[in-house]
Structures are given as C-alpha cells and as structure tokens.
Amino acid sequence: MIRYYEIALRSANETDYWMEVLEEGYDLKSDLMKNDKSELLEISKVLETIIINLKK
C-alpha cells in the first residue's frame, strides 16, 4: 500500500514539473493554472501525510 502512494506522489511531483515547464515555456500565468497548481500541492501534502502515517 505504501508503494502505491509513493508512486502517486512521484506522479504528482512530475506533474508539477511539467506544469512549471508549460508555465515558463509558454508564459502562462492564468488563474486556472494557479488553481491547478494549488490543488496539486494539496494533493501532494495529503499523499505525503498518508505515506508518513503508514510507515509508523
């Protein structure tokens, strides 16, 4: 189960990377992109918390 969440967290980190590439490469500063990045950050934090709690 831990492995599943670790893979999900890595995918979230990779998504964040590609969103940064799109933002800088195409000079996107839209509110939609900001909202998506904010939501992605929340998801990452939840996944991190789940992983930490499962490892206890």
Image (spheres, rainbow, N blue to C red):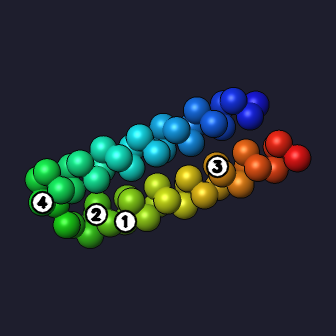
The answer to the question of whether label 2 and label 1 lie on touching residues, with beta carbons closer than 8 A, is yes
Residue type beneath disc 3: Leu
The numbered disc on residue 51 is: none
Q: Give the SS element for disc 4.
A: loop
Going from N to C along the chain, the mark reached first, 1 or 4, is: 4
The answer to the question of whether label 1 and label 3 lie on touching residues, with beta carbons closer than 8 A, is no
Residue 7: quadrant of the picture: top right
* Residue at x-position 83% and y-position 42%: 55
Going from N to C along the chain, the mark reached first, 3 or 2, is: 2
Going from N to C along the chain, the mark reached first, 4 or 2, is: 4
Label 1 sits on residue: 35
Q: Give the SS element for disc 2.
A: helix
On the picture, is 44 further left or further right than 3? left
Label 4 sits on residue: 27
Outermost residue on the left side: it is 26
Label 3 sits on residue: 47
